[in-house]
Image (cartoon, rainbow, N blue to C red):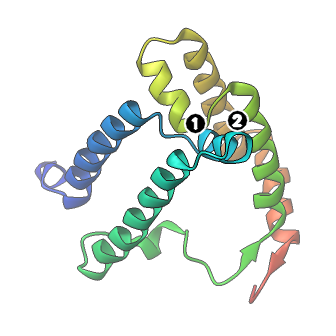
Amino acid sequence: MSEVFVSPMLWGGLIFGFLFGIVMQKSGFCMLAALSNMVLMHVVRHLHAWLAALLIAVPGTILLEYYGLVDIASVGFRQADTQLGGPILGGLIFGLGTVLAGGCASRTLIRSSEGDLGALVVFSCFTAAAMITLFGILAVPRAWLQAHTVVGPA
């Protein structure tokens, strides 16, 4: 039990999650806002913030793995093959939901924590849909789609 409380991944996740939450809340960080502002108003401020976050997250993750603080290979994100059907279909559905909800999941989480009940309902539905897709009635079609749209060494 005590080794859980000294885990660098636990404390790193809590610290970085807290700091990222503050930045998200103050900046209105949202991928939908970044893209729509760029396309509709030709304002790239939010896109720059999103790219900066990406340029910090990727090298940061690589450094954490390099120094042995986290084991990224064990979580399944690094795979030799690529499934195309799930990400394409899921991305389209997620993008449509993001537009209908008025913001991405991270922005919806921030709005719900600020007391927006509509955002809380949207975030609850997002969470339920994710669980249904991973473990519920949509798990079988998701697994079939992943197995039948593999590109690379399967």
Q: Residue 15 bears which disc, if any? A: none
Q: Which of 18 and 85 lies nearest the eye of the viewer?
A: 18
Q: Is residue 117 left or right of residue 11?
A: right
Which residue in the structure is indicated by mark 1?
105
x, y (%) of residue 60?
33, 69
User: From the viewer's perspective, is 37 left or right of 55?
Assistant: right
In-front residue for pair 78/31: 31
Residue at the image position 37 percent from the left and 73 percent from the top: 59
Q: Quadrant of the C terminus?
A: bottom right
Label 1: state its secondary structure: helix
Amino acid type assigned to the residue bearing label 2 in the image: Thr
Precedes in sequence: disc 2 or disc 1: 2
Say what amino acid the circle numbered 1 marks: Ala
x and y, in percent, of residue 52 in the image: 43, 59
From the top left corner, tell me how far across and down residue 137 is, in percent.
79, 39
Q: Label 2: which residue?
A: 98
- Residue appearing at x 67%, y 27% in the figure: 102
